[in-house]
Amino acid sequence: MAILNILEFPDPRLRKVAKPVTVFDDRLKMLSEDMIETMYEAPGIGLAATQINVHKRIVVIDVSEDHSEPMVFINPQITVLSDQQREWEEGCLSVPGFHEIVVRPRDVQVSAQDVDGNNFELEPDELLAVCIQHEIDHLNGKLFVDYISSIKRQRIRKKLEKAHKQSK
Ligand code: NI
């Protein structure tokens, strides 16, 4: 397995829209495993393929505390089930060091495929519901900082750009 490099805001590659996965082969399984390992190493609770510069609709998530529940979502889609919203303080491996409150639908259903191409559905609650919406946003080129004020977003952008220059 391999640890993959994670793109950081404001890298323009994070704005690409990912394409559906159509081939369910060993490469997809290996990539999913590398993504899970990269997520654990970071450490984080979710990672979208977009963040490792692979523009395919693949998301990995593990919201357990002991890395015991890795989940892979291929071609995930969200259906909003009610008007209820929920606030959550979100962070992102592509926006390291920053956390902001984001409001999202509370009640959602996810349909996706597993690495073998089998369809599955689930109704996630709490953190998992937030996380899956955050990760699907990545596949659509969207980041959690898009939900906050442009002043705050600019401040984060400048700080990260400065940090990236210093680390070169
Ligand atoms: Ni993220």
Image: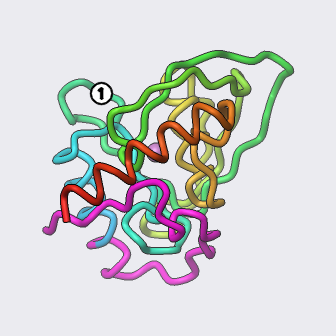
Q: Is residue 40 left or right of residue 62?
A: left
Mark 1 residue element: loop
Q: Which stretch did the figure color magenta?
A: 1-30
Question: Most prominent secondary structure in the magenta stretch?
Answer: loop
Q: Position of residue 145 (x, y in %)?
A: 58, 39
Q: Amino acid at mark 1?
A: Ser
Residue 81 is situated, as x and y percent measured from the top left of the image, at: 81, 28
Residue ID at (73%, 26%): 105
The image quarter in which residue 12 lies: bottom right
In the picture shown, does residue 47 fall above or below 81? below
- Rendered view: 12 above or below 152: below
Q: Nearer the viewer, residue 27 or 48?
A: 48
- Residue 70 in the image: above or below residue 59: above
Residue 67 placement (x, y as % from top left): 21, 35
Q: Is residue 71 visible in this depiction of the protein? A: no
Query: What's the residue at 39%, 56% (across, down)?
Result: 8
Q: Is residue 29 above or below residue 155?
A: below
Task: Determine which quarter of the picture holds residue 66.
Answer: top left
- Mark 1, Cα crowd under 10 Å, few <14 / some 14-19 / many 20+, is few
Depth check: give the residue in front, 10 or 112.
10
What scheme was used to colour the molecule? rainbow
Magenta stretch holds residue 26? yes
Which residue does the image show at 42% across and 66% down from the upper left? 115
Q: Residue at x 30, y 37 (%)?
A: 69
- Left or right: 78 in relation to 135: right
Say which residue label 1 marks.
Answer: 64
- Residue 97 falls inside the magenta stretch: no
Question: For disc 1, does the CB lie below 8 Å from ligand 1?
Answer: no
Figure label count:
1
